[in-house]
Each structure stands twice: as structure tokens, then as C-alpha cells.
Amino acid sequence: MANHRAALSSRTGAGTRAMLASPGLLLFVLFFFLPLGFVLAEALAGGAHGIRTLFASRAFWTGFVNSLALGALAATISLGVGLAVALRLARMAERPRLAWQFLIALPLTFSGLIVAYGFILAFGRAGFVTLLLERIFGVDPVAFSQAVYSPHGLAFVYAYYLIPRVVMMLTPVLVNFDTAQLAAAESLGASRLRTLMDILLPQLKAPMISAFALVAAVAIGAYGTALALVGTQVNILPLQLFTMVSDAGSDFAVTATLGLVLAALCTLVMGLGEWVGRGRQSGIRSD
């Protein structure tokens, strides 16, 4: 009798979980798997034509390398600054920390166009920061503004809304970190830098790797900010895809293949980050 009740309760719980998960699963199917299926069908419509044409294009490989470099640079800047901000927030009391987290998260609500135009108004040729530097230090506004429209400047702009993502991911980890370990190391004569390098950072490798992979994938796949800031002057995969989609005479098989490659690249970066991060985390736990 008891076994029957347990089995009935288990089936009821499984049915409840399935019912609660069904709306999210339906949305996932309608807005991810279904469009992805159409794109895949379009890419395979011409056989291997799309893959051969795309992989034979020198512009594709140049954009591929540039996209990886842009993602790595933007993620490195974002992780470095975000970690420093998260360390400072973790030492605050709860109320001021929540207030600062709210302010830091505001860039996440802006669209890529707003971010791009904001940087143009600030660091463009007639931007107020550019004109201020010209007045104080005699900086050439033309040469200075060109940096914003370069790939390095694009990574700097991306970091504006990628840093909050890193902060939101690392702050809860640092808040729950046992700081008694750091105090014990310092009481034994270790410097503050040594305690951070030998105690704190090794235990933060897993969330740091996950955060790096997430923001790198976002930077690789983003196009709105790049389109508004540099147009098509920088050869990266998202702008290649935008050009192909906006061109009515483009080869749809090649365009669909490029879309699949870009989606696979972003997925691979995030998957590697999660895999390496979990490996680091399990290694720390086993130690």
C-alpha cells in the first residue's frame, strides 16, 4: 500500500513538473527550434553548395578571426573590470550593494543603437569628451575619434554593457565567499595580493570562466551596436550576415549557412565555458 502511494505521488509530481515546464518548452520550440529548422532546411536546400561557397570565401575567414578576436578582447576587458567591481560590491552592506547593482544593471536595458549613439556623442569627432581632451591636452579630435570606430574601440563599447553581466554573475559568489580564509592567510603574513592570487582566484575560476564565455558569446553574436557604430567597415560575422540578409540578390543557402555557423560558434563558446568551468569546480571540490 505504501509503495502504491509512493508511486502515485511520484507520477503526480512528474505530471505537475511537466505541466509547469510545458509553456517554456512550447516557447522554446516555437521561437528556437522551429526557426532553426527553417534555416537548416534552407542551408541544405542546395546540398553542399552553401558550405563550399562560404568556406571558400576569404572574407568569411577574415570575419571569423576578427569575431573571435573581438569576443576575446571584449570579454577580457569586461571580466577584469567586472571582477574588480564585484569585489568592491561584495564588501558593502546589503542595501547599498543592491542600490549599486541596480545602477550597474541599467546598461542592460539599453538597446545596441542607444549605446552606440551614446559613445558617438561622447567620444566621436565632436563628442564632449573628445572636445574636452582637445581643450585640455591638445588631443587631435580626428585621430582620437577614429579609435572608437576601430575594432578595439568596438570592444571597448561592447564592454559597457558586458561588464554588468559579469558583475551580476560574480557578485553573489563573492558575497557568499568565506572571507575567513583570506583573514587567516593575512594573519600568517601573506600580502593582500598573495591572498587574492592563491586563495580567492583559484576558487573563482569556475564562475569566472563561465562569465568570460557568456560575454564572449554575446560579443561575437552582437550586431546592432557594431552596425550603428562602424557600419560595415569592420569585417565580423554578424555584419556579414546582416549584409547578406539585407541584400535581396544574395545566395540564401550561403546566408543560412553563415547564420548556422555563427549560432554554432556562439553555442560552442558558451558550451566550452560551462564545461571547463564545471571541470574546475569539481576539481576544487575534490581537493
Image (cartoon, rainbow, N blue to C red):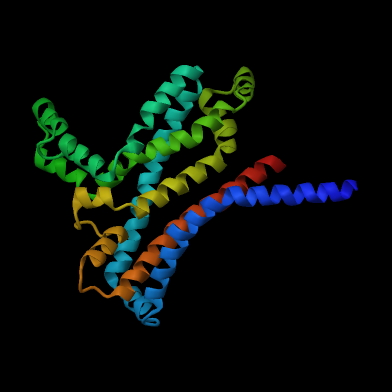
Residue 156: where, in percent of width, then height?
29, 42
> Can you see residue 146?
yes
Q: In this rendering, would 23 be left or right of 99?
A: right
Residue 91 sits above or below residue 217 on the image? above
Give residue 184's position: percent from left, percent from top.
64, 21
Q: Residue at x 59, y 27 (%)?
A: 176
Q: Quadrant of residue 114?
A: top left
Residue 92 appears anywhere in the view: no
Residue in the image at 39% along x and 69% along y: 39
- Residue 137 spot, x, y in % from top left: 13, 28
Q: Is residue 257 above or below residue 119?
A: below
- The residue lying at 19 percent from left, 57 percent from top is 233
Measuring 40% from the left and 23% from the top, which residue is drawn there?
100
The picture places residue 99, in percent across and down from the top left corner, at 41, 22
Quadrant including the C terminus: top right
- Left or right: 280 as drawn, with respect to 250: right
Instruction: Judge by depth and name the residue closer to the eye, 286 or 184.
Output: 286
